[in-house]
Amino acid sequence: MAMTGVLRPSHVALRVLDLEPAVKHYTDVLGLLETGRDKQGRVYLKAWDEHDHHSVVLREADAAGMDYMGWRVDSIQTMKDLSRKVEESGLATDCCWIPAGEHLETGERFRFTTTTGHTMELLAEKNKVGNCLPLVNPDPWPDGLKGMGPSRFDHCLLYGDDLDGVVKLFTEVLGFDITEQVVAEDNHDFRISVFLSCSTKPHDVAFIRQPMKGAFHHASFILDNWGEVLKAADIISKKKVSLDLGPTRHGITRGETIYFFDPSGNRNEVFAGGYIHYPDKPIITWTSDDLGRAIFYHDRKLNENFLGVFT
């Protein structure tokens, strides 16, 4: 499948309460690589198999959470076309252009706020620094990885009030597919959550309907397999990291998962498995009466802390 338009998640910018403990968590526990620091004091990181300069940006602030999420598009022309469509859609506010260089090694970005109150960006240019392996005759993974060692930033789960508006923006304007949805047991037209993909993954972003704007549930990073998820659980205990839930499996996406918190209370996930999505794949629907199994397939129970804690 030739991928065009929005290609993948590019970065997530997170607020942390104390920068250096956060950097230590994201490098030593999660296993990201630091790639730079800017004059504003922000720290840039990437997973080992990402070629772009960064996929995570950390900023010290008074409150934890997500500043914005960035999306890589296939060309400058696509970015211009999509920016015009976003502005004309009536489904976004605060549209503006961020000049090249405001992020390290990054070109111009188009920024907007969704109806759920989340800030998003489109960008077409970010310098490639390599994936720690040669492009000719590479080994399957590099030496010297720390912590859990994810290969890439995978997705975010976000909370917001106007789920219908944000789904319309992502599907009708940005060209995403709905892969899965949770609907009310007694009204299948009422969506509770939606999982969206711009690629062949089960999801690149997901939204849950909640009565607030701009809330951040988690950022997820991909591992190779279930064994690596179990190793991540060992690292969480070894490093005395705050565990949220897991290791377990999701019904939604079929992914294998464990959740934990950074020192500021931002939730992280490492994730493996899942299916391949193509545009002609039918939407998978879960009903709210089976939500426990949809989220946590093994114990089939809802967990109020998992649903109720966010930044």
Image (spheres, rainbow, N blue to C red):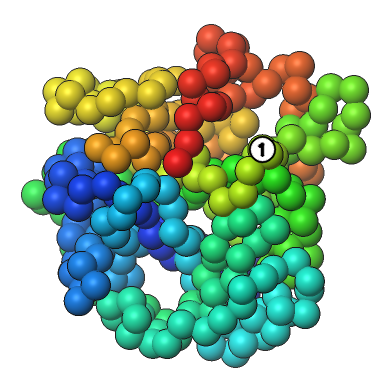
Depth order, front residue of 277/156: 156
Q: Quadrant of residue 175?
A: bottom right
The answer to whether any part of residue 266 appears in the image is: yes
- Kindly identify which residue carries mark 1: 210
Q: In which quarter of the image is residue 75?
A: bottom right
Answer above or below: position of 196 versus 123.
above
Residue 32 rendering spot, x and y as whole percentages: 23, 51
Q: In this view, does 57 lie to the left or right of 278?
A: left
Q: Is residue 304 left or right of residue 288?
A: left
The answer to whether any part of residue 128 appears in the image is: no
Q: Is residue 137 left or right of residue 11?
A: left
Residue at 79%, 71% (x, y): give it.
90
Quadrant where the N terminus lies?
A: bottom right
Residue at 65%, 61% (x, y): give it.
114
Q: What element carries label 1?
A: loop
Amino acid on which the number 1 mark rests in the picture: Gln
Query: In the rendered picture of this protein, how many numbered marks are placed on residues?
Result: 1
Residue 163 rendering spot, x and y as whole percentages: 73, 48
Residue 225 rendering spot, x and y as whole percentages: 37, 34
Q: Quadrant of residue 85?
A: bottom right
Answer above or below: position of 65 versus 310.
below
